Amino acid sequence: MNASLPIRQAVVDTVSRLCRAFDERDWVAMRLCLADMLATDYSRFRGTPPEQLTAEEFVRLRQSGLVGLRTQHLCFNHLVTLEGGRAHCRCDFIIHRWPERTDDARFFHTYGYYHYNFVNPAGEVWLIESITQFAIHSEGSPELHGAHRSRQHTPPPDTAREPKAATP
């Protein structure tokens, strides 16, 4: 079911606060966007399996992964739905990444979409309880990204597509 305008806006605001927290390196604000436990799936970008993390672990990993980078996280085309007491948001993204050193002309940009799931435990703020990233295309120098610094990473061509339903 489509979300009411106030719920939709609250969910979109949480996504926007998360993006801003990445770019401003505001780790406290990032933590305030997250449920205590978080399911993440970045397998289509990093080639790593999905995992369950505490919110603190998630923030700590982003903190170390963004060392030496300037970023701009853009999310748009938000589609918000409700299912029971949970909200779901699908939105497109562009993530721009550049070295902090302005004399370094490298960049690493990624384009795709996210699926976020939200809970509203206190009845006020919608908190992210899962993030799935569907990276469609990246360009530039992947070694700039913390997840790729120790290895060159080229995902197989079919990993950018949304997974198909399993057949029995």
Image: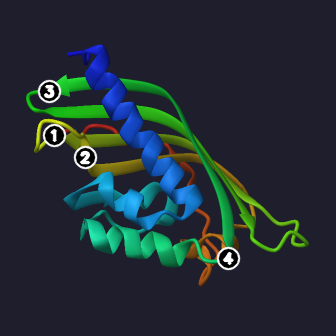
Identify residue for label 2.
127
The residues bearing labels 1 and 4 have C-alpha atoms spaced at a distance of 34 Å
Residue 79 position in % (x across, y down): 38, 24
Identify residue for label 4.
68
The residues bearing labels 2 and 4 have C-alpha atoms spaced at a distance of 28 Å
Left or right, 152 with reference to 141: left
| Label 1 with label 2: CB-CB less than 8 Å | yes
Which element type, helix, strand or loop, lies under badge 4?
loop
- Which of the two marks, 1 or 3, is nearer to us in this view? 1
Dot 4 amino acid type: Gly
Disc number at residue 83? 3
The residue that appears at 11% across and 44% down in the rendered structure is: 121
Which element type, helix, strand or loop, lies under badge 2?
strand
Q: Is residue 166 visible?
A: no
Residue 13 position in % (x across, y down): 40, 35
Residue 19 position in % (x across, y down): 50, 49
The residues bearing labels 2 and 3 have C-alpha atoms spaced at a distance of 15 Å
Residue 25 position in % (x across, y down): 54, 65
